[in-house]
Amino acid sequence: MREDRAEMSEDEDRALDLGGGGPDASNKTESSGGSCGAGDSPSPFPDQVLDNVLEDVLRFLTSRRDRNAVSLVCKSWCMVEALTRSDLFIGNCYAVSPRRVVDRFRSVRSLLLKGKPRFADFNLVPPNWGSYFSPWVTAMAAAYPWLEKVYLKRMTVSDEDLGLLAHSFPGFKELVLVCCEGFGTSGLSVVASRCRQLRVLDLIEDEIMDDEVDWISCFPETGTCLESLIFDCVESLVNFIALERLVARSPSLRKLRLNRHVSIGQLHRLMVQAPQLTHLGTGSFSFSDLMVQGDQEPDLVSTFAASKSLICLSGFKDILPEYLPAIYPVCANLTSLNLSYANINAEQLKPVIYRCHKLQTFWVLDSVCDEGLQAVAATCKDLRELRVFPMEAREDIEGPVSEVGLLAISEGCRQLQSILYFCQRMTNAAVVAMSKNCPELVVFRLCIMGRHRPDHLTGEPMDEGFGAIIMNCKKLTRLAISGLLTDEAFSYIGTYGKLVRTLSVAFAGDSDMGLRYVLEGCPKLQKLEIRDSPFGDSALLSGLHHYYNMRFLWMSSCKLSPLGCKEIARRMPRLVVEVISYRDEETDDAVEVLYMYRSLEGPRNDAPKFVTIL
Amino acid sequence: MEGTVTFESDLNLKATELRLGLPGTNESEKQTPPSVRSNKRALPDMNEESRSKNYSSVTEAAGHGDRETAPPSKAQVVGWPPIRSYRKNSFQPKKTEADADAEATGIYVKVSMDGAPFLRKVDLKVYKGYPELLKALENMFKFSIGEYSERDGYTRSEFVPTYEDKDGDWMLLGDVPWDMFISSCKKLRIMKGSEARGLGCGV
């Protein structure tokens, strides 16, 4: 789970300093960098003193917002800030080039880089669209030999990239890959064997090719610094004996998330080796077909009882529900529980959840039904984040969770900050109730899976419900809307959504006014993704004043024309306007996908044939 | 920064100057700050209409492979609901309440064979009777079991299939009717040699 990767799922982003080109390399730069505190000339010049002091002070500034603000004060501050910034956040890999980054920032130790738009997760972006890590790792290999941490989200990473990374950064410590693809177990093996200081290897929701390389065996034989090893998304088998030995020689290991090929018996053996774990992904939580002769039925209950530090539990990928009670001993300490792969019903959930008084993050399948959610509401008074995933992602069925579950949660979990709720039917009343009961809501994502579905009791559109959320939840920054929605809903968002940074729209709205309300009314809007909604060129034009403030705009299957998009491109030179086509032939019909984003670099040179940059 | 910077007397006021332009830029003639800094709505004529631009049309892919078409047909809806595909494929649809109790998830028991290093797991519900089960076991462990007779048990082979029942007793496979067997069997063991003799005489 990503609860501790605040940076990765954070909606926050301060605008990149668009005007900030790299400072010229000059004598001034060299000397102020070199004489930091050393004073090798008799009397330091006034500006050097300033810079030295500034450097020392700025080292304390870690927030990128603060640093961006500092860099705007004057040239001197901009330069010193650039020299001392060690953590780099790049929300869109195409907004700025590796060259420019490397020229400006000289002492980067940590890079966070995001690539594809989020709708790529749902197959709306054709393969080979872009977001390649290669140019970045190449540039950094030369410029930042002391690089320690790389976090990538929705990037295309190759085995060669991983090889270059492993060979270029001797002090490399943390690699976190989220929703990435393009590499396989051979790339992992190079990282494992070459990065001797590696503390964190987190593979989260990646697509990793099975090169049939035993990467687990590639870690240093003499002991590792590993603190976190997350590989629950790896589909291929791992060498269990090697894994067991790895865990045994990794005394600092605190986080371990296993993939679905690790059986419950194997889990038991690993837990015995590592009772100090704080975060555990349990693998399949089921038998494997093959078990070693002589294995007793694993005494899981004792093992869990011995894991006194466990606060975060996930996995359960093929769960045998009769083994779930084994986790009872740790429930009282759990702050995070992910059962979103566990096909269990309310009766199976209750004895677990009734013990989880401290739970703050809970991910679950809708197989637990409204009744299961009522049990959650009754016990988890400190719940901050809830995600309810559908077992059957279809539109035409009854569905096991509804407004009943949502209402119960709103009444029981008053501290709720973030919710993602998939359902088939919903009412305005329940959503309104949540808006009043949960004033701490920052993220509200409701997905009524039936398209254009109204309030199932009143037949009304869902405008009032979402309107209430935007009006009453004063801290709301992220919103995803669904169900039958008219322009009225957008009017609410434009009027009250002054803090909204991320908005997801699907199958909603009546006319251009809908989009206009949002573009004209939401000054903090950063990320706007829209699909299958009737918004056209004139709506698009109403946002010209704001597009440079945004990270991106995505509009697919709307009513845009090539002419309208060209007009935007003409009027906003710092915007890259991509038209993505699903079909082979060029057409003057409606634009299928518009993806546009601010950038210092102009059109990218790695765009595939199906992308037209206007 | 200026190219030639003198340290001797110059306080380098330019570097510490506070001005409206962004510090990173060097051109002093830049008239309009980019609207990123302003929350005000920019008038259209501020948007550099007179700047000449390079329009790049379709750019060739730099050897990144052929595009694969992902055309959403009008009838289907690609990417809806917004669930990642590995979640969509994770589950079989749940049976209805009525079925759930009756069907359950199969009856899994462990099977071990003397001398073999690995255990196996079988779902007894899959088999209709003893012959099928025995055949499966033979295939699984690569041995031959011969025939079963009520009087003599398994005489033709040195392997004898046995099972542990609910009471903890070790029984010969085939002694009780199949339905009774699958409801009482806790685990299977294929014994070898003399150990098995004593079991040949029924319950």
Image (tube, coloured by chain):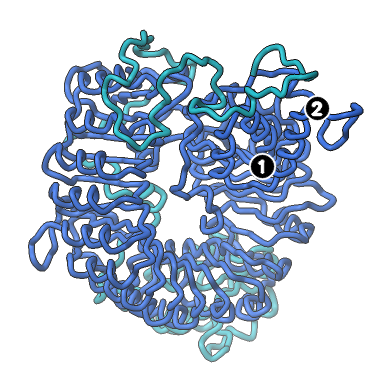
Chain colours: A blue, B cyan
Q: Position of residue A116 (x, y in %)?
A: 43, 35
Residue B145: image x %, image y %?
Answer: 56, 67
Mark 2 belongs to chain: A
Q: Is residue A72 above or below residue B168?
A: above
**Quarter-wise, where is residue B110 in the image?**
bottom right
Q: Residues within 10 Å of mark 1 (few under 14, many from 20)?
A: many
Q: Amino acid at mark 1?
A: Lys
- Foreground: B48 or B165? B48
Q: Is residue B27 above or below residue B20?
A: above
Nearest the eye: A361 or A123 = A361
Which amino acid, mark 2?
Answer: Phe
**Is the residue marked by circle 2 packed among few (<14), some (14-19), or many (20+) residues within 10 Å?**
some
Quadrant of res A309? bottom right
Left or right, A242 with respect to A223, comes to left
Residues under numbered marks 2 and 1 in contact, where contact means CB atoms less than 8 Å apart = no
Query: Total marks drawn?
Result: 2
From the viewer's perspective, tell me whether residue A540 is left or right of residue A510.
right
Task: Please tell me which residue is depicted at 64% across the width and 69% down the height of the picture.
Answer: A268
Vertically, is A397 above or below B199?
A: above
Residue receiving disc 2: A45
Image position, residue A277 (x, y; %): 67, 66
Q: Look at 73% across and 40% down and name the residue there.
A: A172
Q: Secondary structure at mark 1?
A: strand
How many angstroms separate mark 2 from mark 1 (CA)? Answer: 36 Å
Residue A442 at what x, y percent from top left?
39, 59
Query: What residue sits right under mark 1 in the picture?
Result: A149
Indicate the quadrant where residue A347 lies: bottom left
In this view of the protein, can residue A160 be seen by the observer? no
Question: Which quarter of the figure is the N terminus of chain B placed in?
Answer: top right
